[in-house]
């Protein structure tokens, strides 16, 4: 049930005696049950219709149920966030983590010597809520805490592992012909406990599938492109599978720059913090349209990366040719000098 169904019921209906009835005349418990059947974007839109509907549409239990339906791992967030007896604001969490981050927001101007820009405050700790489904069945749901303040994390390439080495075989893959990447769905939500802000770090559906010919593994990529720097960066959430045995080997998140190189932990944290503070994509109602848009942005990112590599290769070829020409000229000059001595 979507916003259209609610809007269709909102005009006044006239009974036989001429009195008008609106949807708000229904009992509050009935309206609450109806609103709980809406998706998050529709529920937020209905809350803007009137003050009465706003009160029902901001019910914390309704938003908690929506978050748990999409991200079952959210159930384990309280001990990780260190909130004590306080509850998670599931409505704010959904508003932050459901839409894709805005990848076309303008980059900040470069700092000038006279007025240097303040450095962004990097998260000291990251919490990842990771949920992996295959054919609609949850096969991995866990919360991962990362100490982002250590020198090792800041100096090494940005990487967070939700699953590594242990691996498992999904029951849906064991009973069928193996893992189908079209049936994989990954939700990776990054949270900063200090600010309470969250970020959608995966595209939900795979935007690309790569094959490792040496090992026979395949890597399904659930990437989200962020702005910042030259050519932007991509949050590359990847699921590594062995298709022969239907085995999931790794689930990890890294940050990749426009040249295809891994970004350091410090630079990756800066990109994540900027994306958390930036606006979300407007009109992101989820579904196939949003996932197709995420795939197109990643394909544009890959095309730009390929073009940069080709340009660098041509530049290096020209430099090699110039160096060869200078070396040949120097050698010929040396021979001429020896000849006329």
Image (cartoon, rainbow, N blue to C red):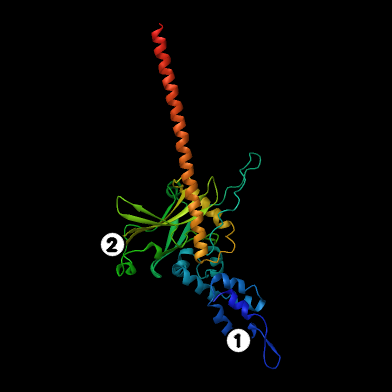
Looking at the picture, does residue 26 appear above or below residue 324? below
Q: Residue at x 55, y 80 (%)?
A: 34
Residue 300 lies, in percent from the top left, at: 50, 51
In the rendered image, the residue lying farthest to the top is: 341
- Which of pointers 1 and 2 indicates the residue nearer the eye? 2
Left/right placement of residue 285 relative to residue 238 reads: right
In the rendered image, the residue lying farthest to the left is: 245
Q: Which residue is mark 1?
A: 27
Chain-order first, disc 1 or disc 2: 1
Which quarter of the figure has residue 46?
bottom right
Q: Which residue is mark 2?
A: 245
Residue 148 lies, in percent from the top left, at: 46, 53
Circle 2: element type: loop
Left/right placement of residue 316 relative to residue 11 reads: left
- Taking the image as drawn, is residue 170 in sight? yes
Report the quarter where the C terminus lies: top left
Question: Total number of numbered labels?
Answer: 2
Residue 120 lies, in percent from the top left, at: 57, 50
Label at residue 204: none
């Amino acid at each position: 049930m979507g916003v259209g169904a609610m809007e269709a019921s909102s005009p006044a209906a006239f009974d036989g005696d001429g009195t008008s009835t609106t949807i708000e005349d229904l009992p509050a418990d009935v309206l609450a049950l109806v609103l709980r059947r809406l998706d998050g974007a529709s529920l937020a839109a209905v809350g803007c219709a009137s003050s009465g509907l706003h009160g029902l549409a901001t019910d914390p239990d309704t938003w908690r149920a929506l978050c748990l339906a999409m991200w079952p791992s959210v159930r384990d967030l309280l001990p990780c966030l260190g909130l004590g007896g306080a509850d998670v604001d599931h409505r704010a969490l959904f508003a932050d983590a459901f839409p894709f981050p805005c990848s076309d927001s303008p980059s900040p101007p470069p700092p000038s010597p006279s007025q240097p820009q303040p450095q962004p405050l990097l998260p000291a700790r990251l919490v990842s809520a990771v949920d992996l489904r295959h054919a609609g069945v949850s096969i991995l749901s866990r919360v991962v805490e990362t100490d982002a303040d250590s020198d090792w994390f800041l100096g090494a390439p940005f990487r967070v592992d939700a699953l590594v080495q242990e691996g498992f075989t999904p029951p849906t893959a064991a009973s069928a012909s193996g893992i189908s990447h079209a049936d994989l769905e990954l939700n990776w939500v990054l949270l900063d406990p200090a600010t309470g802000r969250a970020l959608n770090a995966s595209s939900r559906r795979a935007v690309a599938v790569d094959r490792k010919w040496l090992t026979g593994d395949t890597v399904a990529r659930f990437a989200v492109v962020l702005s910042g720097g030259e050519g932007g960066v991509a949050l590359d959430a990847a699921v590594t599978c062995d298709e022969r045995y239907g085995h999931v080997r790794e689930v990890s998140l890294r940050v990749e720059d426009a040249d295809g190189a891994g970004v350091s932990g410090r630079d990756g944290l800066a990109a994540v913090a900027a994306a958390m503070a930036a606006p979300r994509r407007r009109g992101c109602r989820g579904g196939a349209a949003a996932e197709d848009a995420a795939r197109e942005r990643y394909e544009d990112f890959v095309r730009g990366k390929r073009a940069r590599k080709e340009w660098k290769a041509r530049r290096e070829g020209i430099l090699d040719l110039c160096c060869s020409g200078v070396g040949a000229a120097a050698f010929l000059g040396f021979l001429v000098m020896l000849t006329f001595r």
